[in-house]
Image: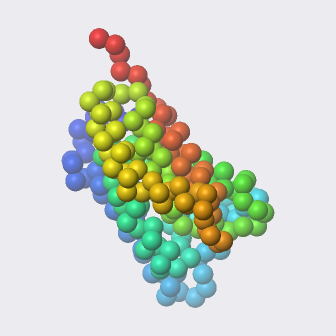
Amino acid sequence: MTSPADTRRSTPLGRFVSPVALLALMWVVQFADAVLPGSFSGFGLRSWDPSGLGGIVVGPLLHASWPHLIANSVPFLVLGCLVAVEGTRRFWAVTAMVAVIGGLGTWVANAPGTLTVGASGLVFGYFGYVVLRVFAPGRVAHRILYAVVAIIVVSLYGGSMLAGVIGVREGISWQAHLFGAIGGGIAAFAGRRRTPSP
């Protein structure tokens, strides 16, 4: 949950440093992967392989190609900043929860040996969080604002998010999308305190 102290310490623009920095790290990793021998993709999440569980942390930073990274960058930045509005600690807590739940779900649901890389699981997790935090306990004024934001987000990304789960082409992990969204939905309710009745 976001503490009042965390919110006060974060300046309006300062809250967006975390998603921008995380995206910048993805671009640095992709550049390094392009210029160095070999491929970093082997460090991604490899399903049903215990040694591949490290991909839960590393996998979202890796991308199969520049078009893969570019396709993820804009929605990651937009949705990540909408999560970061609630504070830096909240952003990292949501990111961690989405990565773990989305990663474990993908690890189990994918065919053994399947390698998954990319930030799309985080993107779907942020989407799930932004939409479902409307229903989480909190101040009425905040929930009204969240509802307006959620309507805009659904109108912009809802179709592509749905297609990313039920209409994906071969080579794209609907499992990462689905379990990432589930992780974001759980994060929307985790650590929330109900506002006391007056």
Q: Looking at the picture, how far across and down is residue 129, in whole percent? A: 45, 44
Q: Quadrant of residue 139?
A: top left
Judging from the image, the colouring scheme is rainbow
Q: Quadrant of the C terminus?
A: top left
Q: Looking at the picture, how far across and down is residue 187, in whole percent? A: 49, 40
23 relative position to 124: left or right: left
The answer to whether any part of residue 141 appears in the image is yes
Of residues 6 and 166, the one drawn nearer to the viewer in this rendering: 166
Q: In the rendered view, would you say 62 is above or below 177?
A: below
Q: Looking at the picture, how far across and down is residue 89, in whole percent? A: 38, 44
173 relative position to 136: left or right: right
Q: Quadrant of the N terminus?
A: top left
Of residues 28 and 66, the one drawn nearer to the viewer in this rendering: 66
Q: Quadrant of residue 131?
A: top left
* Rendered residue at 42%/38% (across/down): 133
* Rendered residue at 26%/30% (across/down): 141
Q: Quadrant of residue 54?
A: bottom right
19 relative position to 37: left or right: left
The answer to whether any part of residue 44 appears in the image is no
* Rendered residue at 45%/67% (across/down): 72
